[in-house]
Amino acid sequence: MNSAHGEAVGSAAMENLLTVDDAERLAEKTLPPDAWSYVQGGAGDERTLRWNREAFSQFRLRPRVLVDVSAVTTETTVLGTPVSMPVLVAPMAFQQIAHEEGELAMARGAAAASTLMCLSTVATATPRDVAAAAPGAPRWLQIYVFRDREVSDQVIAEALEAGFSALVLTADLPVYGIRHREARTGFEAPEGVVPAIVAARARGGDAEGHHSLDLLESGLEWDYVAELRERWNVPVIVKGLVTAEDAELACAHGAAGVVVSNHGGRQLDGAIASLEALPEVVDAVAGRAEVYLDGGVRRGTDVVMALALGARAVLVGRPAMYGLAFGGEKGVRQVLEILRDETENALALLGCRSPAEVTRAHVSTIGSP
């Protein structure tokens, strides 16, 4: 939650914001150290966190010239839903630690930028309230499965009734990653203002442990993907896989999409970078589902590189939280519009008039012919 000083810092600098890196610096000045450690930190020695960014330096764009790019659009679709750009807002928990309006401001900012927001199960606002904050805007619900399945079912039912159009099952958090940066600052999750956690505790969850993650199911298997799809009759996306083997299993169990992700480097330190894993997942999926990338995106050139490697769109978490921290709804919109403008510029310079025209021919790896 922002201090008066933080709000003043944000207001003074918003007009001069040029890049996502600028937004990151501004957010760090705005947030207290414990909240910043949660937003910015990763697991262990934070190697995977670094590799997510560094992976973009392992590929090279191959622009084509003398192409008519007098009319370029960043518009695309995800699972048939139109969005203004191939950049979506990733699910992030506890958004009130960044701004008092939390997910409500995030939803309005994403809607103002005409793109899709994915709401976390452990949000500090209900799906119904998020839908009311940005009526008509596209939304997906990210799913954490509680040991008490009725809690998860209630969240899903509320979201679908409020117009959420897909479920995003996070698959890479059977247990909580070891996050030393959070421990050193004494970060504590604001569990008392998270409706789903409050409901789980009210139903007798206190006996299972003291941390909110103790309330979650660690025994999920692939059959649950099919169960979700069949029970709720909506598309199911599996988030948090980085291998061809798991991509094949996701398709075999009816996933409409997969998100190549290592949880932003917050789970298994030493895991492969998301962008590095993207080509093998795309090849394994072979057009049976849409593929999205999550992790390390900070520039429009990053977006088009992911598209060239086969992603339909990318999800951004930390950049959106930076905007939320220093500027609420306006900050979120500003960060997303920076990415949209950079993506449009990158498309034109690549010789592409839309995201659909970006192909593998537009990218190469270091050392390849």
Image (cartoon, rainbow, N blue to C red):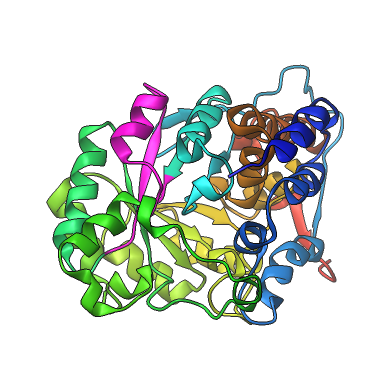
Which quadrant holds residue 217? Answer: bottom left
Q: Is residue 245 left or right of residue 12?
A: left
Asked whether 333 or 291 is in front, the reply is 333
Residue 172 spot, x, y in % from top left: 43, 71
Residue found at x 45% / y 59%: 286
Residue 359 visible (yes or no):
no
Residue 264 visible (yes or no):
yes
Residue found at x 76% / y 60%: 56
Give, as a single range, the part of the protein colored magenta. Answer: 119-145
Q: Determine if the magenta segment contains residue 226.
A: no
Q: Is residue 294 left or right of residue 276?
A: left
Residue 303 spot, x, y in % from top left: 68, 45
Residue found at x 63% / y 51%: 318
Furthest toward the front, the residue is 4
Q: Determine if the magenta segment contains residue 142.
A: yes
Above or below 243: residue 303: above
Furthest toward the top, the residue is 70
Image quadrant containing the C terminus: bottom right
Residue 164 spot, x, y in % from top left: 31, 36
Image quadrant containing the N terminus: top right
Above or below 311: residue 163: above
Above or below 277: residue 305: above
Numbered-mark total: 0
Asked whether 88 or 109 is in front, the reply is 109
